[in-house]
C-alpha cells in the first residue's frame, strides 16, 4: 500500500477518529517542558484546541481560554487531552477528580501517558457510567519485529538533541513543511504522543520494548521512492541518563542520511536531572554520527536547530551566526524561519 507521495505506508499505530476539538488539560504542571503535548497541539493543530484547564496549583499556561469541561463542551469541545508528558508518564492523584469531572460533563479523555486511563478505577467507573471513551494513543502495534539493519530506499532525516523537550518535534515538523514547500515528496513521521496526535499516526517509540526499538523505527519509515524524504521526530538524547535507550534504537532503525541536532541555549543540565550537565553541541554531533554509522555509513549532520524562544530577535540572530561559524554548519531556529532556516534546509538537501 502506497501513499500519495509514493512511499510505502508504515504499519504504525493509528489514532484516527479522535474526539475533536480538544480541551487541553495541564494537570499540576509548573514547568513548561512537561506540558509539551499541550503546547505542541496549540502550535501545530490550533483549529482543534478550544481552551485549557488544570489543577489550581498549575502555573503553566498555553494562553488559551481557561474553561471548565462544561464550558468547553458548550463551545464545541468533544475530548479532553492530557497535555502533560511527565517523568514516567503517570496520572497524578490530584488529576483524578478533575478527569472524572470532565467525563461527567460529557467529554472523552485522550492520553499519551504510559499509564493507561482505564487502570484508574474511579476514571474507568465514571467512563462506564457516562458512556464516554478513554483513549490511549501511546500503544504500539502488535508483532513489531527486531531491526534488521538492512538498507532501505528513500531518504531520511532524524532530529536528535542534547536533551529532552527542547524542539526535536517542532524542528521535524518545520523541516517536513519546508521540504514540501520546495516541491519535494516528504512525510513527517511521529514517534511520540504529541506528534501522533498532530499527524494522526505514528509509532510511540518510548512504549516499545527495547529489543524491538530498531524494528519499530524501520516499520515507521519503510522503503520509499528514491527522492522521497521521511522526516523523523527524534526522542530523548543519547546523553540522557534515563531515555538514551529509545534514542539509540531510533537512530539505528531510522538509518538517517541526515541528522539535525536540536538544543536550547542556556540550558545547563538535563531536565529533571540537575546533576547531569548537558553535552556540548560538538560532542552531540560526534556521538550521534559515530553510532549512526553502524546502520548508515553515509550519515552526516545537516545543521543545528536552536530553540531561541527566550531570546530577543537580534540576540537570537547573533547566536545563530556565532554557532554556525564555530561549528562550520548552518544554525537556525525553525520557528523564526528566515535566511538562517533556508540555509539549514539547503544543507540538509545538499
Image (tube, helix red, strand yellow):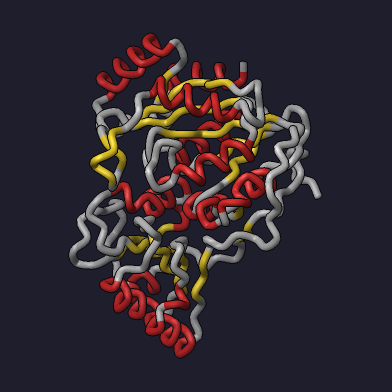
How many callouts does the rendering have?
0
Q: Nearer the viewer, residue 220 or 53?
A: 220
Measuring from the top left, give residue 39's x and y in whole percent: 37, 49
Snapshot quadrant of residue 250: top right
**Residue 78 shows in the view:** no
Residue pictured at 59% horizontal, 41% vertical: 188
Measuring from the top left, give residue 101's x and y in whole percent: 33, 79
Residue pictured at 47% horizontal, 57% vertical: 48
Measuring from the top left, give residue 77's x and y in whole percent: 43, 68
Residue pictured at 68% horizontal, 56% vertical: 144
Snapshot quadrant of residue 111: bottom left
Does residue 70 lie above or below 144 as drawn? below
Does residue 329 lie above or below 207 as drawn? above
Residue closest to the far right? 1
Measuring from the top left, give residue 194's x and y in whole percent: 47, 52
Q: Nearer the viewer, residue 238 or 53?
A: 238
Does residue 260 lie above or below 85 as drawn? above
The C terminus is located in which quarter? Answer: top right
Q: Viewed as shown, does residue 344 lie left or right of 59? A: right
Q: Nearer the viewer, residue 13 or 69?
A: 13
Q: Viewed as shown, does residue 179 lie left or right of 194? A: right
Does residue 191 lie above or below 76 as drawn? above
Q: Nearer the viewer, residue 230 or 270?
A: 270
Amino acid at each position: 500500500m502506497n501513499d500519495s507521495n509514493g512511499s510505502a505506508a508504515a504499519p504504525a499505530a493509528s489514532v484516527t477518529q479522535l474526539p475533536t476539538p480538544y480541551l487541553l488539560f495541564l494537570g499540576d504542571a509548573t514547568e513548561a517542558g512537561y506540558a509539551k503535548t499541550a503546547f505542541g497541539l496549540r502550535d501545530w493543530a490550533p483549529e482543534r484546541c478550544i481552551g485549557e484547564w488544570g489543577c489550581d496549583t498549575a502555573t503553566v499556561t498555553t494562553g488559551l481560554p481557561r474553561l471548565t469541561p462544561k464550558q468547553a463542551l458548550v463551545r464545541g469541545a468533544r475530548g479532553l487531552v492530557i497535555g502533560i508528558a511527565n517523568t514516567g508518564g503517570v496520572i497524578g492523584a490530584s488529576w483524578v477528580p478533575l478527569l472524572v469531572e470532565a467525563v461527567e460533563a460529557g467529554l472523552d479523555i485522550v492520553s499519551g501517558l504510559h499509564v493507561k486511563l482505564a487502570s484508574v478505577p474511579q476514571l474507568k467507573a465514571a467512563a462506564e457510567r457516562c458512556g464516554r471513551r478513554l483513549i490511549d494513543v501511546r500503544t504500539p502495534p502488535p508483532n513489531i519485529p527486531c531491526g534488521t539493519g538492512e538498507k532501505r530506499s528513500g531518504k531520511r532525516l532524524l532530529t536528535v538533541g542534547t536533551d529532552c523537550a527542547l524542539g526535536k518535534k517542532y524542528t521535524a515538523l518545520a523541516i517536513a513543511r519546508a521540504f514540501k514547500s520546495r516541491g519535494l515528496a516528504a512525510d513527517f513521521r511521529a514517534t511520540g504522543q504529541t506528534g501522533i496526535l498532530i499527524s494522526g499516526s505514528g509509532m510511540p517509540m518510548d512504549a516499545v520494548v527495547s529489543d524491538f526499538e530498531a524494528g519499530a523505527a524501520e516499520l515507521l519509515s519503510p522503503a520509499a521512492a528514491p527522492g522521497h524524504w521521511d522526516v523523523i521526530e527524534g526522542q530523548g538524547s543519547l546523553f540522557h541518563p534515563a531515555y538514551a535507550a529509545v534514542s539509540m534504537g531510533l537512530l539505528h532503525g531510522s538509518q538517517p542520511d541526515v541528522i539535525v541536532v536540536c538544543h536550547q541555549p542556556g540550558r545547563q543540565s538535563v531536565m529533571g536531572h540537575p546533576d547531569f550537565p548537558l553535552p556540548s553541541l560538538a560532542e552531540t554531533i560526534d556521538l550521534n554520527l559515530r553510532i549512526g554509522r553502524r546502520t548508515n555509513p553515509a550519515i552526516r549532520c545537516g545543521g543545528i536547530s536552536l530553540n531561541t524562544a527566550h531570546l530577543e530577535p537580534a540576540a537570537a540572530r547573533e547566536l545563530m551566526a556565532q554557532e554556525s561559524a564555530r561549528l562550520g554548519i548552518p544554525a537556525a531556529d525553525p520557528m523564526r524561519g528566515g535566511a538562517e532556516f533556508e540555509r539549514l534546509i539547503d544543507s540538509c538537501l545538499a
